[in-house]
Amino acid sequence: MMARMKTIQLYGIPNCDTIKKARDWLTAQGVGYVFHDFKKQGVPADLLPAWLATLGRDTLINRKGPTWRSLGPEVHATVVDDASAIAVMLAHSSVIKRPVVVWADGRVTVGFKPEWFAERLP
């Protein structure tokens, strides 16, 4: 269990360009990580409340992406609190901004820029 806590966890979908960039960058730096594929492994429902508490709905839900736009205003209007946000994220994993990263020290971030990742490495 302790070994897992020291591993970087990267969450997202493999065909996402930002995920590809993040994975390539980590590999190029020689940094080990575990990738959790939302499409194959599902969204980790047990982690969503903590992610929302840390990041907030406005950061975690990609309201500019094609999946969110395709859901329409009737679904958009239902996201009024964390419970309703979780329901939408579980039903439509592609609305979650990517990558969600749980760092070795337990911090949670979303998105990728090489300088952000470099700052978080030991």
Image (cartoon, rainbow, N blue to C red):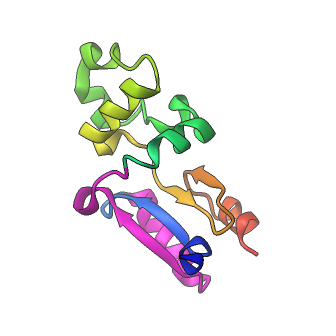
Q: Nearer the viewer, residue 49 or 60?
A: 49
Residue 39 falls left or right of residue 9: left
Q: Residue furthest bottom?
A: 30
Is 27 on the left or on the right of 107, as rendered? left
Q: Quadrant of residue 73?
A: top left
From what the image shows, is residue 94 above or below residue 118?
Answer: above
* 49 in magenta: no
Nearer to the camera, 45 or 121: 45
Q: Residue at left 51%, top 66%?
A: 9
The range drawn in magenta is: 17-44
**Percent position of residue 69, x then y:** 30, 27
Residue at 66%, 64% in the rendered image: 117
Query: Residue at left 55%, top 74%?
Result: 25
Most distant residue in the front direction = 1
Q: Image quarter for residue 104?
A: bottom right
Q: Residue 118: x, y in percent?
A: 71, 68
Q: Name the quarter where the C terminus is drawn.
A: bottom right
- Image coordinates for residue 40, horizontal then vertical, percent: 23, 62
Q: Is residue 27 magenta?
A: yes
In this picture, residue 79 sits left or right of residue 73: right
Q: Position of residue 52 (x, y in %)?
A: 53, 37
